[in-house]
Image (spheres, rainbow, N blue to C red):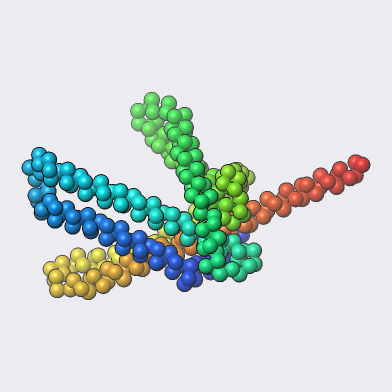
Amino acid sequence: MNLFKHLVFAKNFAFDAKRVGVFLVFYALALLVLGALALSFLTAIGVSLGSLTGFLTQSFLFDGQRFFKFAGFGLFFLFAFVILALVFFLAFLWLFAGVTRNAAHLLRGNRVSLSACLSEGLARLPALVVLTILVGLSSWIASLIAQFVLMFLLVVPVVGLVVYGVLIFLVSIVISLAFLFAQFFLLVRDAGVFESMRESVRLFARKPGSVLVAFLSYLVVLLAVIIVASLPLVATFLLAVASLATLASKIVLFAVLGVISIAFLLLGFSFTVVFNAGFFSSVLFELSTERVERVTRIKGKRLIAGKKKR
């Protein structure tokens, strides 16, 4: 596997204002909407139940009217949060599918606009949602089976617990690697839901080293980008702590610095998602093409051998 080629392709793919901008707007919108919902919840509590001190007093627990009013607000905002989280989850899958389709077209030598790829991603969204759910369920069931099988290790007091924890962690890693390319088979190779899961497991069984190297390489890039993107926010926080005595007079300055730092962090998140789509699409394109070529050569040899026998 030509790892350097895949990293370069992913880097060039991710250094695109449109692709990164799509996710940057998505993250900013999600943060604003969910933040506004949380602020509305706190405001509703303050207006209807009084101060936070009153809310925390013991008398509140025995005031049925106020308690049920709070419970009603809590259930309403919990329901709203779940609905919004689901909407943003589907939106993220749609954007990821569109950007991955864009990478797939580039790898085939076709230049297709991002808007057209987003339309293709919307068409693949139902299958992607089903695949995501099935992969999650399959991983969960496999983890439960592993925990049940390895439960005998817990008989040994300390060593058994440590070995059990290590083995469960390794099993979780293996399961994650086995399904690592499932979404990309669906989006890059246009495979079906079950075929994508099967082919991802086969790819890992056939080339575990390549899959592991690809995963670790992306993990290194992810950590490096997130660390760099977090530096402005960490610096702003430390500066605010150091200036705590005069913070009130500089509140506007720190508010502006905080917004800029958060925007830079969201930019880092956006870059890593686009890099993910480009990198794993490129890796899959090479590894799955190798398999197709190998199968074709085997079938060709069998066909030639069959003709010679005749």
In the drawing, does residue 111 fall left or right of residue 133? Answer: right
In the drawing, does residue 277 fall left or right of residue 106? Answer: left
Residue 200 showing in the rendered view: no
Residue 100 sits in quarter: bottom right
Measuring from the top left, give residue 199's x and y in whole percent.
61, 46
Residue at 70 percent across and 51 percent down: it is 292
Residue 208 sits above or below residue 167 on the image: below
Measuring from the top left, give residue 180's x and y in whole percent.
52, 49
In what quadrant of the picture does the N terminus appear?
A: bottom right
Residue 299 showing in the rendered view: yes
Residue 283 sits in quarter: bottom right
Q: Residue placed farthest to the right in the image? A: 310
Towards the viewer: 195 or 289: 195
Residue 154 sits in quarter: top left
Measuring from the top left, give residue 141's x and y in whole percent.
47, 36
Residue at 27 percent across and 68 percent down: it is 258
Residue 300 sits above or below residue 147 on the image: below
Residue at 75 percent across and 50 percent down: it is 296
Residue at 67 percent across and 55 percent down: it is 289
